[in-house]
Amino acid sequence: MKLNYWIAIIIGLIVMFGLLSLAYSAEVWTDLQIVEAIWKAEGGYKATWLYGIRSVSYADEAEARQICFNTVRNNRVRYAEYGYKEFNSYLDFLGSRYCPIGCDNDRGTNRYWLSNVRYFLEKSK
C-alpha cells in the first residue's frame, strides 16, 4: 500500500511539472524572435519609426534594431527583478514599457501592440 501511494505521488508530480512546463513554454521566446516580431508589428520598412522607436534618435535600421534588442534584453532583467509581481508574463511587462497604452503618443493603437507581437511570434513557429 505504501508503494502505491508513492507511485501515485510521483506520477502526480510528473504530470504537474509537465503541465507547468507546457504553460511556461508558451511564452518563452528568444530576444531575437521578439525583436523580429516587433519589427513586423511596427510595420517593418514601411514604418515611420523603425521598430516603433520614438524616444531616442537613431541613424539607420541597424541602430534601431540594436536599440530594440537592448530594450528587450534589459526588460527581461527588470521583469525578473520586479515586473513579475505585477504582470502575468514577460511580454505583458514588455508591452507596458515598449508601447504603453494611454501614453502621450498613443493614438489608440497601442492596445493592439501586444496581440500583434504575439501574432508574429506564433506565426514564426
Image (tube, helix red, strand yellow):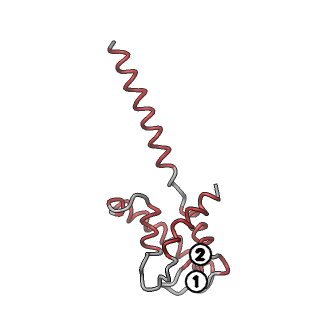
The secondary structure type at the circle numbered 1 is loop
Q: Is residue 98 left or right of residue 32?
A: left
Q: Residue at x 47, y 47 (%)?
A: 23
Q: Is residue 85 above or below residue 8?
A: below
Picture quarter containing residue 36? bottom right
- Which amino acid is tagged 2? Glu
The residue lying furthest to the top in this view is 1
Q: Is residue 10 above or below residue 95?
A: above
Query: What residue sits right under mark 2 in the picture?
Result: 42
- Which amino acid is tagged 1? Trp
Question: Looking at the image, do the residues carrying marks 2 and 1 touch, with CB atoms under 8 Å apart?
Answer: yes
CA gap, disc 2 and disc 1: 8 Å
**Residue 57 position within the rendered picture, expressed as x and y whole percent measured from the top left:** 53, 87
Q: Is residue 67 above or below residue 35?
A: below
The residue lying furthest to the right in this view is 45
The secondary structure type at the circle numbered 2 is loop
**Residue 97 position within the rendered picture, expressed as x and y whole percent measured from the top left:** 43, 73
**Residue 85 position within the rendered picture, expressed as x and y whole percent measured from the top left:** 32, 60
The residue lying furthest to the front in this view is 108
Query: What residue sits right under mark 1 in the picture?
Result: 49
Q: Residue at x 51, y 49 (%)?
A: 25
**Residue 34 position within the rendered picture, expressed as x and y whole percent measured from the top left:** 55, 64
Query: The C terminus appears in which quarter of the rendering?
Result: bottom right
Q: Is residue 84 left or right of residue 115?
A: left
